[in-house]
Amino acid sequence: MKPTSIILVFVFALLLSACGGAAAPQLSSSESGGVAAPAPAAPATDNRALEQAPAGDAQSSAGGAPADQQGIDRLVIKTADLSLEVESVRDAETAIRTQATRLGGYVVKVETSGTDENLTSRITFRVPAQRFDDALAGVQGLAKKVLARTVGGDDVTEEFVDLESRTRNLEATRDRLLTFLEKATKVEDALAVNNSLSDIQGQIEQAKGRMQYLKQSAALSTISVAISPVPAITPIVEEGGWQPVTIARGALRSLVELGQGLASIAIVLLVWTPVWLPMVLLVLWVRRRMLERARKSAAPTTSEAA
């Protein structure tokens, strides 16, 4: 009975193998000249959904995707705008330059106006995003007074994820077009496919360039600082009412000036005596002669009347 059982089991295994071989050709029709049915496409993975989902759910939804695709770091472009009053504008500008270099950043632009006590400056520099808070604290430590402070951030994560998804779709389209180009047999078809390829490649480069810009902008934060000197304190002197001492001093000063003026005139007249004295004597002599003639002519007229 035992050899018979072994033979039956062997025959049953042969039959199962034959059934499997017969069913296999039905799954593919490439040998008969037909078109093979395309394999079901894998569902697209939404990076934003992965970012919001827990790690375990992301692993199951991504089908065992690498760890760097399970979540996306937030891309935030940080900016700050400060207005400060400092003791010395030049010293503060030098300190900001030194601080930017020490934190691994660099100065973008410096604008200076005025001179000496009225000197003002605006300096713009960039530092790594992880040193943003250190840079703000260092800049504010230079101020005697913080006049204004504005800190903001632009979250570009959604735009970056959209660009990433768009790039993948464009690259998939490009690969399909390359396949069509290889199979094209007519010149017209090849030219049409090539034009489409150029357009798709341009869109891919544009999307990648924008992604690179967003990465660099998020990696380096921008801080702009307006520096002005501390205004000088001008003491306010309260003027009193009637001040007799001041009035007396003014009157004495006027009297002295008048005396000096009269003395100056006398000195001038004395110096010019040879000029004006003969003229005065001549005028007096002429006047006297005219008076004498008038009296002589008036005397006969009086006697005739008598």
Image (spheres, rainbow, N blue to C red):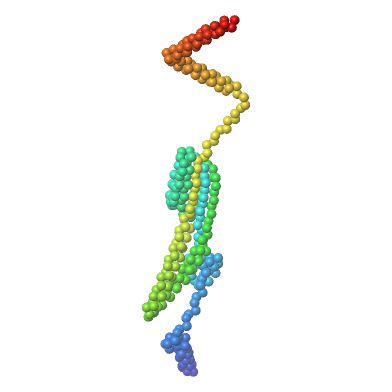
Query: Against 210, is 103 above or below?
Result: above
Point out the residue furthest to the front here.
Answer: 304
- Please identify the quarter of the rendering in which residue 243 is found: top right
Q: Is residue 120 visible?
A: yes
Q: Position of residue 194 (x, y in %)?
A: 39, 73
Q: Position of residue 35 (x, y in %)?
A: 45, 84
Query: Against 183, is 80 above or below?
Result: above
Residue plotted at (45% across, 47% down): 111
Query: Against 230, is 291 above or below?
Result: above
Q: Position of residue 32 (x, y in %)?
A: 43, 88
Residue plotted at (51% across, 63% down): 159
Question: In this image, 303 relative to 107: left or right?
Answer: right
Front position in the image: 255 or 297:
297
Residue plotted at (55% across, 47% down): 148
Front position in the image: 2 or 246:
246
Q: Is residue 6 visible?
A: no
Query: Against 239, is 107 above or below?
Result: below
Q: Quadrant of the C terminus?
A: top right
Front position in the image: 206 or 131:
206
Residue plotted at (49% across, 51% down): 223
Q: How many marks?
A: 0
Q: Position of residue 79 (x, y in %)?
A: 51, 53
Front position in the image: 138 or 256:
256
